[in-house]
Image (spheres, rainbow, N blue to C red):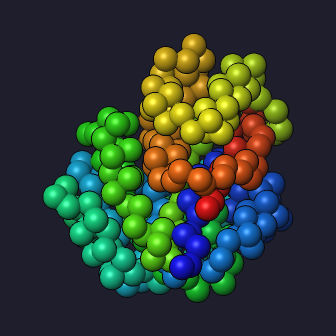
């Protein structure tokens, strides 16, 4: 019996992390090297919110530069991975009876390609994105995630891409490494609850006294719940990267492996 694919949560941070030689380049390359080559990758990215659930179903997804004010080198980057209409259809079947729209317009946003450009730089593994339905609460997102569990036995690497701590309004460019006290406290709380397998606490994150500052952006937090909800009994938890950048952006990442 083959070993199930792991599930990853990656704190992707600034688009600048996509650049060769960037702060996360070697760490993300090491993460890619630590997993068996998947048949395909399914990413839940903070940067694709929709009304209703959608999945990219095109054969050749475009590279989306969904940011502004960054160096031209970032806008010149392309991640030419193929899509997988077959995987999109499999996702639709697993999530039924929830309607899932086959999307032919979106592509790969920087929550996906900035990470995969280092993990799988050859761009030779098909990539599909699953959107975040902005109308759902976290328990509903967790329920959707659990229905994706069979993909782990089918060679699909599932990645949640966001940031456990994400507050751009408190972003401090003079602090490239290190976090504000409230960011550190909340990040430590999340690491503790992830390690304990406490999905209920992760879903109820807003009850933490630092949550309003540390995680005001639901869409960046939700991909963590997708990854944590796919943890199986017996999976071990690994903290892959663990730092806070610019005071208010957590790069902490996790793997759930059999």
Residue 24 visible, this orientation: yes
Quadrant showing the N terminus: bottom right
Instruction: Place residue 249 in its image quadrant.
Output: top right
Q: On screen, 118 above or below 173?
A: below
Question: Who is closer to the viewer here, 193 or 177?
Answer: 193
Residue 223 visible, this orientation: no
Instruction: Place residue 178 in its image quadrant.
Output: top right
Quadrant showing the C terminus: bottom right
Q: Residue at x 16, y 58 (%)?
A: 97
Q: On screen, 145 above or below 113?
A: above
Instruction: Please give the count of numbered marks on the rendered protein.
Output: 0
Q: Residue at x 48, y 43 (%)?
A: 225
Q: Residue 42: horizontal and vertical position, in percent? A: 46, 67
Q: Residue at x 81, y 54 (%)?
A: 23
In the picture, measured across the screen, residue 17 lies left or right of residue 127, that is: right
Q: Residue 93: horizontal and vertical position, in percent? A: 24, 69
Q: Residue 176: horizontal and vertical position, in percent? A: 81, 39
Instruction: Place residue 250 in its image quadrant.
Output: top right
In the picture, measured across the screen, residue 246 lies left or right of residue 98, that is: right
Q: Residue at x 46, y 47 (%)?
A: 229
Question: Who is closer to the viewer here, 28 or 13?
Answer: 28
């Amino acid at each position: 019996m083959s070993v199930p694919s792991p599930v990853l949560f990656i704190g992707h941070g600034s688009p600048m992390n996509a650049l060769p030689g960037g702060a996360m380049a070697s760490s993300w390359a090491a993460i890619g090297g630590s997993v068996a080559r998947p048949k395909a990758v399914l990413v839940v990215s903070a940067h694709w919110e929709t009304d209703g659930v959608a999945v990219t179903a095109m054969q050749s997804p475009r590279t989306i530069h969904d940011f502004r004010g960054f160096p031209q080198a970032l806008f010149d980057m392309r991640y030419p991975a193929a899509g997988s209409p077959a995987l999109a259809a499999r996702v639709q079947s697993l999530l039924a009876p929830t309607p899932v729209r086959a999307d032919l317009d979106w592509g790969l946003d920087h929550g996906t390609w900035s990470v995969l450009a280092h993990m799988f730089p050859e761009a030779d593994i098909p990539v599909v994105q699953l959107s975040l339905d902005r109308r759902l609460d976290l328990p509903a997102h967790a329920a959707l995630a659990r229905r994706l569990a069979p993909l782990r036995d089918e060679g699909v690497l599932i990645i949640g891409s966001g940031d456990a701590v994400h507050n751009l309004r408190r972003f401090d460019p003079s602090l490239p490494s290190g976090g504000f006290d409230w960011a550190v406290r909340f990040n430590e709380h999340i690491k503790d609850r992830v390690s304990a397998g406490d999905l209920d606490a992760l879903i109820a994150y807003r009850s933490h006294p630092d949550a309003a500052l540390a995680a005001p952006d639901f869409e960046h937090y939700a991909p963590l719940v997708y990854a944590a909800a796919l943890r199986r009994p017996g999976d071990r938890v690994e903290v892959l990267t663990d730092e806070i950048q610019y005071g208010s952006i957590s790069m902490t990442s996790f793997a759930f492996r059999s």
